[in-house]
Amino acid sequence: MGMTLTEKILARHAGLERVEPGQIINARVDLVLANELSAAVSIGVMRSIAGADRVFDPEKIALVEDHFVPAKDAQSANLAKMMKDFAREQNVKHFYDVGRGGIEHVVLPEEGLIAPGEAIVGGDSHTCTFGALGAFATGMGSTDIAAAFILGEVWLRVPPTIKIVYRGKLREMVFAKDLMLQTIGMLGIDGATYCAIEFHGPTVDELSITGRITMANMAIEAGAKNGIFHADAKTIAYVRERTSREFVVERADGDAAYQRVVEIDVDRLEPQIACPHTPDNVRSVTEVTREDIPLDQVFIGSCTNGYIEDLRVVAAMLAGKKIASNLRVIVNPGSQAVWMQAAEEGILTTLAGAGCAVNTPGCGACFGGHMGTLGDGERCLSTTNRNYVGRMGSPKAEVYLGSPATCAASALTGKITDPRIVSAVGV
Amino acid sequence: MERRLRGFAHKYGKNVDTDVIIPGKYCNLVDPAELGKHALEGLDPEYAVRMKPGDIVVADTNFGCGSSREVAPIALKGAGTAAVIAKSFARIFYRNALNIGLPIFESVEAVDGIETGDELEVDSTAGTVRNLSKGTSYKAVAFPPFMQSLIEAGGLKPYVERRLAEKKSG
Protein backbone atom coordinates (compact mmCIF):
# COMPACT_ATOMS: atom_id res chain seq x y z
CA MET A 1 0.00 0.00 0.00
CA GLY A 2 1.33 3.43 -0.93
CA MET A 3 1.39 6.64 1.03
CA THR A 4 -0.51 9.93 0.78
CA LEU A 5 1.35 13.20 0.21
CA THR A 6 1.31 14.04 3.93
CA GLU A 7 2.53 10.55 4.86
CA LYS A 8 5.39 10.81 2.34
CA ILE A 9 6.61 14.11 3.77
CA LEU A 10 6.26 12.96 7.37
CA ALA A 11 8.05 9.66 6.70
CA ARG A 12 11.05 11.48 5.23
CA HIS A 13 11.16 13.94 8.13
CA ALA A 14 10.96 11.09 10.62
CA GLY A 15 13.72 9.17 8.85
CA LEU A 16 11.38 6.24 8.20
CA GLU A 17 10.64 4.19 5.08
CA ARG A 18 6.93 4.53 5.66
CA VAL A 19 4.41 5.77 8.19
CA GLU A 20 0.78 4.88 8.81
CA PRO A 21 -2.15 6.93 10.13
CA GLY A 22 -2.23 6.87 13.93
CA GLN A 23 1.50 6.21 14.25
CA ILE A 24 3.38 8.53 16.65
CA ILE A 25 6.55 9.89 15.09
CA ASN A 26 9.31 12.37 15.86
CA ALA A 27 9.54 14.59 12.81
CA ARG A 28 12.38 16.94 12.00
CA VAL A 29 11.11 20.40 11.04
CA ASP A 30 12.49 22.76 8.39
CA LEU A 31 11.03 25.93 9.91
CA VAL A 32 9.42 26.94 13.20
CA LEU A 33 7.18 30.02 13.17
CA ALA A 34 5.80 32.19 15.95
CA ASN A 35 4.19 35.62 16.33
CA GLU A 36 4.52 38.00 19.25
CA LEU A 37 1.64 36.41 21.17
CA SER A 38 2.62 32.76 20.77
CA ALA A 39 6.37 33.49 20.96
CA ALA A 40 6.05 35.32 24.27
CA VAL A 41 4.63 32.19 25.90
CA SER A 42 7.12 29.91 24.07
CA ILE A 43 10.08 32.01 25.24
CA GLY A 44 8.90 31.70 28.86
CA VAL A 45 8.57 27.92 28.46
CA MET A 46 12.02 27.67 26.85
CA ARG A 47 13.58 29.61 29.74
CA SER A 48 12.11 27.09 32.18
CA ILE A 49 13.63 24.05 30.46
CA ALA A 50 16.95 22.94 31.86
CA GLY A 51 19.80 23.08 29.36
CA ALA A 52 17.78 24.87 26.68
CA ASP A 53 19.87 27.99 26.14
CA ARG A 54 19.85 28.12 22.34
CA VAL A 55 17.37 27.51 19.54
CA PHE A 56 18.24 24.46 17.44
CA ASP A 57 19.09 26.52 14.35
CA PRO A 58 18.76 30.34 14.18
CA GLU A 59 18.24 30.14 10.40
CA LYS A 60 15.17 27.90 10.79
CA ILE A 61 13.12 30.09 13.09
CA ALA A 62 10.77 32.81 11.81
CA LEU A 63 9.39 35.42 14.22
CA VAL A 64 6.78 37.83 12.89
CA GLU A 65 5.12 40.73 14.70
CA ASP A 66 1.57 40.75 13.39
CA HIS A 67 -1.21 40.35 15.96
CA PHE A 68 -1.44 43.57 17.97
CA VAL A 69 0.51 45.75 15.51
CA PRO A 70 1.44 48.55 15.62
CA ALA A 71 1.39 47.90 19.37
CA LYS A 72 -2.09 48.45 20.75
CA ASP A 73 -0.95 49.23 24.28
CA ALA A 74 2.03 48.87 26.62
CA GLN A 75 1.23 45.22 27.32
CA SER A 76 1.27 44.38 23.59
CA ALA A 77 4.43 46.42 23.11
CA ASN A 78 6.08 44.43 25.88
CA LEU A 79 5.27 41.13 24.15
CA ALA A 80 6.69 42.43 20.86
CA LYS A 81 9.79 43.66 22.68
CA MET A 82 10.24 40.30 24.35
CA MET A 83 10.21 38.59 20.93
CA LYS A 84 12.56 41.15 19.41
CA ASP A 85 15.04 40.78 22.29
CA PHE A 86 14.86 36.99 21.94
CA ALA A 87 15.46 37.23 18.18
CA ARG A 88 18.55 39.34 18.82
CA GLU A 89 19.87 37.14 21.63
CA GLN A 90 19.45 33.97 19.55
CA ASN A 91 20.58 35.54 16.23
CA VAL A 92 17.26 34.53 14.65
CA LYS A 93 17.68 35.27 10.96
CA HIS A 94 14.05 35.69 9.96
CA PHE A 95 12.68 38.33 12.33
CA TYR A 96 10.06 40.70 10.91
CA ASP A 97 9.34 43.93 12.73
CA VAL A 98 6.34 46.12 11.98
CA GLY A 99 6.76 47.77 8.58
CA ARG A 100 9.07 45.06 7.28
CA GLY A 101 6.84 42.02 7.24
CA GLY A 102 3.10 41.78 7.69
CA ILE A 103 0.87 38.80 8.46
CA GLU A 104 3.08 35.76 9.12
CA HIS A 105 1.27 33.43 6.69
CA VAL A 106 1.44 36.01 3.90
CA VAL A 107 5.07 36.91 4.56
CA LEU A 108 6.70 33.48 4.75
CA PRO A 109 5.72 32.21 1.27
CA GLU A 110 6.54 35.65 -0.20
CA GLU A 111 9.99 35.55 1.36
CA GLY A 112 10.81 32.10 -0.02
CA LEU A 113 10.80 30.49 3.41
CA ILE A 114 8.38 27.75 2.37
CA ALA A 115 9.14 25.11 -0.28
CA PRO A 116 7.46 21.89 -1.44
CA GLY A 117 8.13 18.79 0.64
CA GLU A 118 9.14 20.75 3.73
CA ALA A 119 7.70 20.37 7.24
CA ILE A 120 6.75 23.53 9.11
CA VAL A 121 5.19 24.05 12.52
CA GLY A 122 3.90 27.39 13.75
CA GLY A 123 2.43 28.92 16.86
CA ASP A 124 -0.70 29.94 15.02
CA SER A 125 -3.56 27.74 13.86
CA HIS A 126 -3.42 29.12 10.30
CA THR A 127 0.08 27.72 9.78
CA CYS A 128 -1.76 25.16 7.62
CA THR A 129 -1.72 27.90 4.92
CA PHE A 130 1.70 26.70 3.72
CA GLY A 131 0.24 23.43 2.45
CA ALA A 132 -0.65 25.48 -0.63
CA LEU A 133 2.98 25.07 -1.73
CA GLY A 134 3.10 21.30 -1.18
CA ALA A 135 4.58 21.47 2.31
CA PHE A 136 3.34 19.78 5.48
CA ALA A 137 2.44 22.62 7.83
CA THR A 138 0.45 22.61 11.05
CA GLY A 139 -0.39 24.94 13.93
CA MET A 140 0.47 24.19 17.54
CA GLY A 141 0.38 25.89 20.92
CA SER A 142 3.28 27.70 22.50
CA THR A 143 4.68 24.85 24.61
CA ASP A 144 4.93 22.59 21.54
CA ILE A 145 6.55 25.47 19.65
CA ALA A 146 9.05 25.96 22.48
CA ALA A 147 9.96 22.27 22.16
CA ALA A 148 10.42 22.75 18.40
CA PHE A 149 12.59 25.87 18.97
CA ILE A 150 14.86 23.76 21.14
CA LEU A 151 14.85 20.36 19.45
CA GLY A 152 14.09 21.12 15.81
CA GLU A 153 11.63 18.27 15.92
CA VAL A 154 8.08 17.62 17.09
CA TRP A 155 6.13 14.55 18.06
CA LEU A 156 3.16 14.02 15.78
CA ARG A 157 0.40 11.53 15.28
CA VAL A 158 0.33 10.73 11.55
CA PRO A 159 -3.07 11.94 10.35
CA PRO A 160 -5.39 9.93 8.12
CA THR A 161 -5.93 11.79 4.83
CA ILE A 162 -9.20 12.93 3.29
CA LYS A 163 -8.86 13.35 -0.48
CA ILE A 164 -11.07 15.99 -2.05
CA VAL A 165 -11.35 16.06 -5.84
CA TYR A 166 -12.78 19.20 -7.48
CA ARG A 167 -14.05 19.01 -11.05
CA GLY A 168 -15.51 21.64 -13.32
CA LYS A 169 -14.92 25.29 -14.05
CA LEU A 170 -15.58 28.11 -11.60
CA ARG A 171 -18.16 30.56 -12.92
CA GLU A 172 -17.66 34.29 -13.05
CA MET A 173 -17.42 35.92 -9.60
CA VAL A 174 -16.87 32.52 -7.96
CA PHE A 175 -13.45 32.17 -6.30
CA ALA A 176 -11.26 29.84 -4.26
CA LYS A 177 -12.86 31.32 -1.13
CA ASP A 178 -16.31 30.19 -2.26
CA LEU A 179 -14.94 26.73 -3.04
CA MET A 180 -13.44 26.42 0.43
CA LEU A 181 -16.47 27.80 2.25
CA GLN A 182 -18.60 25.25 0.43
CA THR A 183 -16.12 22.50 1.38
CA ILE A 184 -16.17 23.49 5.07
CA GLY A 185 -19.97 23.65 5.00
CA MET A 186 -20.01 20.13 3.63
CA LEU A 187 -17.38 18.67 6.00
CA GLY A 188 -18.53 20.56 9.13
CA ILE A 189 -16.22 22.31 11.58
CA ASP A 190 -15.08 19.04 13.09
CA GLY A 191 -15.44 17.01 9.89
CA ALA A 192 -11.70 16.74 9.35
CA THR A 193 -10.47 16.80 12.96
CA TYR A 194 -7.04 15.11 13.27
CA CYS A 195 -6.99 14.58 9.47
CA ALA A 196 -4.97 15.86 6.55
CA ILE A 197 -6.94 17.27 3.62
CA GLU A 198 -5.33 16.61 0.22
CA PHE A 199 -6.76 18.87 -2.49
CA HIS A 200 -6.99 17.41 -6.00
CA GLY A 201 -8.64 17.85 -9.36
CA PRO A 202 -8.66 19.98 -12.49
CA THR A 203 -10.43 22.89 -10.76
CA VAL A 204 -7.66 23.39 -8.21
CA ASP A 205 -4.97 22.72 -10.83
CA GLU A 206 -6.31 25.85 -12.54
CA LEU A 207 -6.17 27.94 -9.36
CA SER A 208 -3.38 30.46 -8.82
CA ILE A 209 -1.00 30.02 -5.88
CA THR A 210 -3.02 32.68 -4.05
CA GLY A 211 -6.24 30.71 -4.58
CA ARG A 212 -4.60 27.58 -3.19
CA ILE A 213 -3.32 29.61 -0.22
CA THR A 214 -6.88 30.75 0.53
CA MET A 215 -8.06 27.13 0.54
CA ALA A 216 -5.20 25.59 2.55
CA ASN A 217 -5.51 28.46 5.04
CA MET A 218 -9.04 27.39 5.99
CA ALA A 219 -8.33 23.64 6.39
CA ILE A 220 -8.24 24.25 10.16
CA GLU A 221 -11.83 25.54 9.91
CA ALA A 222 -12.86 21.92 9.32
CA GLY A 223 -10.62 20.87 12.23
CA ALA A 224 -7.85 19.51 9.97
CA LYS A 225 -4.25 19.14 11.04
CA ASN A 226 -3.08 20.28 7.62
CA GLY A 227 -4.35 20.99 4.12
CA ILE A 228 -2.06 20.23 1.19
CA PHE A 229 -1.79 20.60 -2.58
CA HIS A 230 0.65 18.81 -4.88
CA ALA A 231 3.36 21.14 -6.11
CA ASP A 232 3.12 21.70 -9.88
CA ALA A 233 4.90 23.91 -12.42
CA LYS A 234 3.15 26.99 -10.98
CA THR A 235 4.36 26.13 -7.48
CA ILE A 236 7.92 25.48 -8.60
CA ALA A 237 8.01 28.77 -10.52
CA TYR A 238 6.63 30.67 -7.49
CA VAL A 239 9.18 29.15 -5.11
CA ARG A 240 12.14 29.39 -7.51
CA GLU A 241 11.55 33.14 -7.88
CA ARG A 242 12.11 33.43 -4.15
CA THR A 243 14.77 30.93 -3.09
CA SER A 244 17.63 28.88 -4.48
CA ARG A 245 17.33 26.37 -1.61
CA GLU A 246 17.14 22.67 -2.55
CA PHE A 247 13.79 20.95 -1.94
CA VAL A 248 12.20 17.59 -2.65
CA VAL A 249 8.86 17.51 -4.44
CA GLU A 250 6.82 14.59 -3.10
CA ARG A 251 3.76 12.99 -4.71
CA ALA A 252 1.07 10.78 -3.23
CA ASP A 253 1.34 7.19 -4.45
CA GLY A 254 -1.31 5.96 -6.85
CA ASP A 255 -2.34 3.28 -4.37
CA ALA A 256 -2.30 5.53 -1.29
CA ALA A 257 -4.96 4.75 1.30
CA TYR A 258 -7.37 7.58 2.05
CA GLN A 259 -9.79 7.75 4.95
CA ARG A 260 -12.33 8.88 2.37
CA VAL A 261 -12.54 10.46 -1.05
CA VAL A 262 -14.95 13.33 -1.64
CA GLU A 263 -15.86 14.48 -5.17
CA ILE A 264 -17.10 18.02 -5.67
CA ASP A 265 -18.53 19.33 -8.94
CA VAL A 266 -18.09 23.10 -9.11
CA ASP A 267 -19.81 23.90 -12.41
CA ARG A 268 -22.94 25.19 -10.69
CA LEU A 269 -21.27 26.61 -7.59
CA GLU A 270 -22.47 30.07 -6.59
CA PRO A 271 -20.71 32.58 -4.33
CA GLN A 272 -20.92 31.25 -0.77
CA ILE A 273 -21.41 32.94 2.60
CA ALA A 274 -20.65 31.55 6.07
CA CYS A 275 -23.37 32.93 8.34
CA PRO A 276 -23.03 33.56 12.09
CA HIS A 277 -21.61 31.97 14.24
CA THR A 278 -19.58 29.10 12.78
CA PRO A 279 -17.53 28.83 9.56
CA ASP A 280 -19.53 25.76 8.50
CA ASN A 281 -22.90 27.58 8.58
CA VAL A 282 -22.56 28.08 4.83
CA ARG A 283 -25.28 29.07 2.35
CA SER A 284 -25.27 30.31 -1.22
CA VAL A 285 -25.42 34.05 -1.77
CA THR A 286 -28.80 33.60 -3.48
CA GLU A 287 -30.24 32.05 -0.36
CA VAL A 288 -28.65 34.58 2.00
CA THR A 289 -29.79 37.61 -0.02
CA ARG A 290 -33.46 36.53 -0.04
CA GLU A 291 -33.74 38.92 2.88
CA ASP A 292 -31.95 42.23 3.33
CA ILE A 293 -28.94 41.95 5.63
CA PRO A 294 -27.64 45.50 6.17
CA LEU A 295 -24.02 45.84 7.24
CA ASP A 296 -22.07 48.14 9.55
CA GLN A 297 -18.62 47.05 8.40
CA VAL A 298 -16.93 45.26 5.53
CA PHE A 299 -13.45 43.95 6.19
CA ILE A 300 -11.03 42.97 3.43
CA GLY A 301 -7.72 41.39 4.34
CA SER A 302 -6.19 38.64 6.55
CA CYS A 303 -4.05 35.57 5.87
CA THR A 304 -7.04 34.18 3.92
CA ASN A 305 -7.67 37.03 1.49
CA GLY A 306 -5.13 39.80 2.03
CA TYR A 307 -3.22 39.19 -1.21
CA ILE A 308 -2.65 41.42 -4.23
CA GLU A 309 -5.04 39.35 -6.36
CA ASP A 310 -7.76 39.92 -3.77
CA LEU A 311 -7.16 43.67 -3.67
CA ARG A 312 -7.21 43.83 -7.49
CA VAL A 313 -10.67 42.25 -7.55
CA VAL A 314 -11.96 44.70 -4.94
CA ALA A 315 -10.35 47.74 -6.61
CA ALA A 316 -11.80 46.82 -10.00
CA MET A 317 -15.29 46.72 -8.49
CA LEU A 318 -14.95 49.92 -6.44
CA ALA A 319 -13.08 52.01 -9.03
CA GLY A 320 -14.75 55.40 -9.50
CA LYS A 321 -17.56 54.52 -7.06
CA LYS A 322 -18.38 55.28 -3.45
CA ILE A 323 -19.15 52.78 -0.72
CA ALA A 324 -22.65 52.94 0.79
CA SER A 325 -23.16 55.60 3.44
CA ASN A 326 -24.41 53.21 6.13
CA LEU A 327 -21.15 51.29 6.53
CA ARG A 328 -17.39 51.56 6.85
CA VAL A 329 -14.92 49.47 4.86
CA ILE A 330 -11.56 48.51 6.32
CA VAL A 331 -8.90 47.14 3.99
CA ASN A 332 -5.80 45.49 5.36
CA PRO A 333 -3.19 44.45 2.78
CA GLY A 334 -1.63 41.20 4.05
CA SER A 335 1.99 42.26 3.99
CA GLN A 336 4.30 45.16 3.37
CA ALA A 337 5.04 43.74 -0.08
CA VAL A 338 1.31 43.51 -0.91
CA TRP A 339 0.82 47.05 0.39
CA MET A 340 3.64 48.38 -1.81
CA GLN A 341 2.43 46.50 -4.88
CA ALA A 342 -1.09 47.84 -4.29
CA ALA A 343 0.35 51.34 -3.95
CA GLU A 344 2.26 51.00 -7.22
CA GLU A 345 -0.83 49.80 -9.06
CA GLY A 346 -2.89 52.69 -7.70
CA ILE A 347 -5.13 50.29 -5.79
CA LEU A 348 -4.73 52.05 -2.45
CA THR A 349 -5.79 55.36 -4.00
CA THR A 350 -8.79 53.71 -5.67
CA LEU A 351 -9.89 52.15 -2.39
CA ALA A 352 -9.32 55.28 -0.31
CA GLY A 353 -11.13 57.31 -2.97
CA ALA A 354 -14.15 55.02 -2.66
CA GLY A 355 -14.23 55.71 1.07
CA CYS A 356 -12.31 52.72 2.43
CA ALA A 357 -9.93 53.00 5.38
CA VAL A 358 -6.67 51.35 4.35
CA ASN A 359 -4.66 50.01 7.28
CA THR A 360 -1.17 48.73 7.75
CA PRO A 361 -0.77 44.91 7.50
CA GLY A 362 -1.74 42.92 10.58
CA CYS A 363 -4.12 40.36 12.13
CA GLY A 364 -5.85 42.75 14.55
CA ALA A 365 -9.32 43.11 13.07
CA CYS A 366 -9.76 39.41 12.25
CA PHE A 367 -9.42 38.23 15.86
CA GLY A 368 -11.02 41.21 17.61
CA GLY A 369 -7.66 42.53 18.72
CA HIS A 370 -7.72 46.08 17.37
CA MET A 371 -7.89 48.16 14.15
CA GLY A 372 -11.47 47.27 13.23
CA THR A 373 -13.20 45.81 16.27
CA LEU A 374 -17.00 45.45 16.16
CA GLY A 375 -19.40 46.99 18.69
CA ASP A 376 -22.62 45.60 20.21
CA GLY A 377 -25.21 44.66 17.62
CA GLU A 378 -22.93 45.47 14.68
CA ARG A 379 -22.84 43.26 11.60
CA CYS A 380 -19.77 42.67 9.43
CA LEU A 381 -19.09 40.87 6.16
CA SER A 382 -15.48 39.82 6.12
CA THR A 383 -12.95 38.04 3.91
CA THR A 384 -11.43 36.43 7.04
CA ASN A 385 -11.66 32.82 8.20
CA ARG A 386 -13.66 32.68 11.45
CA ASN A 387 -16.99 34.04 12.63
CA TYR A 388 -17.38 32.60 16.11
CA VAL A 389 -19.23 34.61 18.77
CA GLY A 390 -17.05 37.57 19.70
CA ARG A 391 -14.41 36.75 17.09
CA MET A 392 -14.16 40.32 15.78
CA GLY A 393 -15.07 42.13 18.98
CA SER A 394 -18.39 42.31 20.82
CA PRO A 395 -20.06 38.95 21.55
CA LYS A 396 -23.24 40.74 20.45
CA ALA A 397 -21.85 41.39 16.94
CA GLU A 398 -22.45 39.17 13.89
CA VAL A 399 -19.78 38.15 11.38
CA TYR A 400 -20.49 36.77 7.90
CA LEU A 401 -17.64 35.40 5.76
CA GLY A 402 -17.37 35.76 1.99
CA SER A 403 -15.01 36.36 -0.91
CA PRO A 404 -13.37 39.72 -1.66
CA ALA A 405 -15.78 40.14 -4.61
CA THR A 406 -18.83 39.54 -2.42
CA CYS A 407 -17.40 42.00 0.10
CA ALA A 408 -16.79 44.64 -2.60
CA ALA A 409 -20.33 44.26 -3.99
CA SER A 410 -21.77 44.53 -0.50
CA ALA A 411 -19.64 47.60 0.27
CA LEU A 412 -21.34 49.38 -2.63
CA THR A 413 -24.90 48.53 -1.62
CA GLY A 414 -24.54 48.54 2.17
CA LYS A 415 -26.05 45.07 2.52
CA ILE A 416 -24.96 41.54 1.66
CA THR A 417 -25.03 41.46 -2.13
CA ASP A 418 -24.43 38.95 -4.91
CA PRO A 419 -21.25 40.09 -6.72
CA ARG A 420 -22.64 38.77 -10.02
CA ILE A 421 -25.38 41.41 -9.95
CA VAL A 422 -22.92 44.24 -9.34
CA SER A 423 -20.53 43.04 -12.02
CA ALA A 424 -23.38 42.71 -14.54
CA VAL A 425 -25.17 46.01 -14.05
CA GLY A 426 -22.85 48.13 -11.95
CA VAL A 427 -24.11 50.04 -8.93
CA MET B 1 -1.65 15.98 38.17
CA GLU B 2 -3.91 15.47 41.21
CA ARG B 3 -5.24 11.96 41.16
CA ARG B 4 -8.70 12.75 42.52
CA LEU B 5 -10.54 15.85 41.40
CA ARG B 6 -13.81 16.89 42.98
CA GLY B 7 -16.04 19.75 41.93
CA PHE B 8 -19.32 20.91 40.49
CA ALA B 9 -20.18 20.67 36.79
CA HIS B 10 -20.76 23.62 34.43
CA LYS B 11 -22.20 22.19 31.24
CA TYR B 12 -22.01 23.72 27.74
CA GLY B 13 -22.85 22.69 24.18
CA LYS B 14 -20.77 21.66 21.19
CA ASN B 15 -17.98 23.58 19.40
CA VAL B 16 -16.94 25.71 22.38
CA ASP B 17 -14.27 27.61 20.45
CA THR B 18 -11.14 29.34 21.73
CA ASP B 19 -12.59 32.76 20.84
CA VAL B 20 -15.26 32.31 23.52
CA ILE B 21 -12.90 30.55 25.96
CA ILE B 22 -10.63 33.61 25.92
CA PRO B 23 -11.62 36.44 23.55
CA GLY B 24 -8.81 37.81 21.33
CA LYS B 25 -8.65 41.13 23.13
CA TYR B 26 -7.24 39.38 26.22
CA CYS B 27 -4.58 37.45 24.31
CA ASN B 28 -1.91 39.98 25.27
CA LEU B 29 -2.32 39.02 28.95
CA VAL B 30 0.21 36.59 30.39
CA ASP B 31 -0.75 36.17 34.06
CA PRO B 32 -2.90 33.01 34.45
CA ALA B 33 -4.97 34.61 37.23
CA GLU B 34 -5.73 37.66 35.04
CA LEU B 35 -6.60 35.42 32.10
CA GLY B 36 -8.73 33.34 34.46
CA LYS B 37 -10.97 36.35 35.20
CA HIS B 38 -12.10 36.18 31.55
CA ALA B 39 -12.36 32.40 31.13
CA LEU B 40 -15.35 31.47 28.95
CA GLU B 41 -16.36 35.15 28.88
CA GLY B 42 -17.61 35.00 25.30
CA LEU B 43 -19.99 32.16 26.10
CA ASP B 44 -20.87 32.60 29.77
CA PRO B 45 -19.65 35.94 31.20
CA GLU B 46 -20.64 34.79 34.70
CA TYR B 47 -18.54 31.60 34.66
CA ALA B 48 -15.43 33.11 36.26
CA VAL B 49 -17.58 34.75 38.94
CA ARG B 50 -19.89 31.83 39.64
CA MET B 51 -17.44 28.94 39.57
CA LYS B 52 -15.55 27.73 42.62
CA PRO B 53 -11.95 26.54 42.29
CA GLY B 54 -12.05 22.83 41.60
CA ASP B 55 -15.17 23.00 39.42
CA ILE B 56 -15.29 21.04 36.18
CA VAL B 57 -16.30 22.20 32.70
CA VAL B 58 -18.41 19.67 30.80
CA ALA B 59 -19.12 20.11 27.08
CA ASP B 60 -20.33 18.36 23.97
CA THR B 61 -18.17 17.64 20.87
CA ASN B 62 -15.17 19.57 19.46
CA PHE B 63 -14.25 21.51 22.60
CA GLY B 64 -11.53 24.12 21.97
CA CYS B 65 -11.86 24.42 18.20
CA GLY B 66 -10.35 27.40 16.38
CA SER B 67 -7.18 29.25 17.28
CA SER B 68 -3.98 27.69 18.66
CA ARG B 69 -3.85 30.17 21.56
CA GLU B 70 -2.39 28.36 24.53
CA VAL B 71 -3.91 31.03 26.76
CA ALA B 72 -7.28 29.22 26.27
CA PRO B 73 -6.45 26.26 28.55
CA ILE B 74 -4.29 28.60 30.70
CA ALA B 75 -7.34 30.85 31.28
CA LEU B 76 -9.52 27.89 32.28
CA LYS B 77 -6.84 26.62 34.64
CA GLY B 78 -6.11 30.14 35.90
CA ALA B 79 -9.77 30.52 36.88
CA GLY B 80 -9.43 27.38 38.99
CA THR B 81 -11.09 24.92 36.61
CA ALA B 82 -9.94 21.45 37.70
CA ALA B 83 -10.70 19.59 34.47
CA VAL B 84 -12.66 19.58 31.22
CA ILE B 85 -14.80 16.61 30.26
CA ALA B 86 -16.05 16.66 26.66
CA LYS B 87 -17.36 14.25 24.04
CA SER B 88 -14.36 15.21 21.88
CA PHE B 89 -11.65 17.87 21.66
CA ALA B 90 -10.16 19.87 18.79
CA ARG B 91 -6.59 18.70 18.26
CA ILE B 92 -4.54 21.82 19.07
CA PHE B 93 -6.50 22.43 22.29
CA TYR B 94 -6.01 18.78 23.25
CA ARG B 95 -2.22 19.06 23.01
CA ASN B 96 -2.17 22.47 24.69
CA ALA B 97 -4.27 21.32 27.64
CA LEU B 98 -1.98 18.36 28.29
CA ASN B 99 1.11 20.51 27.82
CA ILE B 100 0.06 23.11 30.40
CA GLY B 101 -1.38 20.57 32.83
CA LEU B 102 -5.14 21.07 32.48
CA PRO B 103 -6.64 17.58 32.88
CA ILE B 104 -9.02 16.67 30.06
CA PHE B 105 -11.24 13.64 29.63
CA GLU B 106 -13.17 12.33 26.66
CA SER B 107 -16.44 10.58 27.50
CA VAL B 108 -19.72 10.62 25.61
CA GLU B 109 -21.61 8.85 28.39
CA ALA B 110 -20.31 11.20 31.08
CA VAL B 111 -21.37 14.28 29.13
CA ASP B 112 -24.80 12.80 28.41
CA GLY B 113 -25.26 11.87 32.06
CA ILE B 114 -24.08 15.11 33.70
CA GLU B 115 -26.10 18.28 34.28
CA THR B 116 -24.92 21.69 35.45
CA GLY B 117 -24.64 21.68 39.23
CA ASP B 118 -23.92 17.94 39.57
CA GLU B 119 -21.08 17.17 41.94
CA LEU B 120 -18.38 15.11 40.23
CA GLU B 121 -15.38 13.15 41.34
CA VAL B 122 -12.79 12.29 38.70
CA ASP B 123 -10.11 9.68 39.21
CA SER B 124 -7.55 10.89 36.70
CA THR B 125 -5.42 7.76 36.85
CA ALA B 126 -8.26 5.32 36.36
CA GLY B 127 -10.06 7.65 33.93
CA THR B 128 -13.37 7.33 35.77
CA VAL B 129 -15.94 10.01 36.47
CA ARG B 130 -18.37 9.57 39.37
CA ASN B 131 -21.50 11.67 39.44
CA LEU B 132 -22.06 12.03 43.18
CA SER B 133 -25.35 13.86 42.70
CA LYS B 134 -26.86 11.12 40.54
CA GLY B 135 -25.01 8.12 41.96
CA THR B 136 -23.73 7.07 38.53
CA SER B 137 -20.26 6.60 37.12
CA TYR B 138 -18.74 6.80 33.66
CA LYS B 139 -15.54 5.73 31.94
CA ALA B 140 -13.32 8.16 30.00
CA VAL B 141 -11.48 7.14 26.83
CA ALA B 142 -7.93 6.10 27.70
CA PHE B 143 -5.12 8.29 26.40
CA PRO B 144 -3.03 6.75 23.61
CA PRO B 145 0.06 5.05 25.16
CA PHE B 146 2.48 7.76 23.99
CA MET B 147 0.39 10.53 25.55
CA GLN B 148 -0.02 8.50 28.73
CA SER B 149 3.79 8.24 28.97
CA LEU B 150 4.10 12.01 28.45
CA ILE B 151 1.57 12.66 31.21
CA GLU B 152 3.29 10.21 33.55
CA ALA B 153 6.67 11.81 32.86
CA GLY B 154 5.20 15.14 34.04
CA GLY B 155 4.36 16.73 30.69
CA LEU B 156 6.26 17.92 27.65
CA LYS B 157 9.01 19.81 29.51
CA PRO B 158 10.67 16.76 31.11
CA TYR B 159 10.30 14.99 27.74
CA VAL B 160 12.15 17.85 26.00
CA GLU B 161 14.86 17.85 28.68
CA ARG B 162 15.40 14.13 28.11
CA ARG B 163 15.48 14.48 24.28
CA LEU B 164 17.89 17.40 24.58
CA ALA B 165 20.21 15.36 26.79
CA GLU B 166 20.03 12.45 24.30
CA LYS B 167 20.89 14.78 21.41
CA LYS B 168 23.78 16.42 23.26
CA SER B 169 25.26 13.06 24.20
CA GLY B 170 25.01 11.49 20.89
Image (cartoon, rainbow, N blue to C red):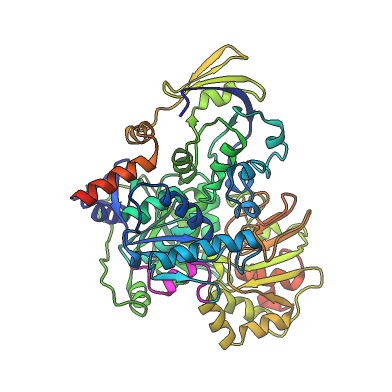
Q: Quadrant of residue A418?
A: bottom right
- Compared with residue B129, is residue B82 higher up or lower down, i.e. above or below? below
Residue lying at 55% horizontally and 51% vertically, measured from the top left: A185
Residue A293 vs A308, above or below: the answer is above
Say whether residue B2 is left or right of residue B53. left
Camera-nearest residue between B73 and A282: B73
Q: Nearer the viewer, residue A133 or A252?
A: A133
Q: Is residue A322 magenta?
A: no
* Residue range (magenta): A100-115
Q: Residue at x 68, y 62 (%)?
A: A381
- Numbered circles on residues, count: 0
Q: Is residue A70 left or right of residue A54?
A: right
**A113 part of magenta stretch:** yes
- Give percent across and percent down for residue B121: 54, 19
Query: Residue B22: percent from the left, percent from the top?
Result: 62, 46
Q: Decide which of A378, B19 is in the foreground and name it.
A: B19
Q: Answer whether residue A157 is visible to the viewer in this image.
A: no
Direction top: furthest residue: B135
Quadrant the C terminus of chain A occupies:
bottom right
Residue B149 percent across, percent down from the top left: 33, 33
Q: Is residue A204 above or below residue A378?
A: below
Q: Quadrant of residue A384?
A: bottom right
Vertical side of A21 occupied by A391: above or below: below
Residue at the location (52% across, 32% down)? B87
- Residue A330 appears anywhere in the view: yes
Q: Position of residue A371 (x, y in %)?
A: 67, 66
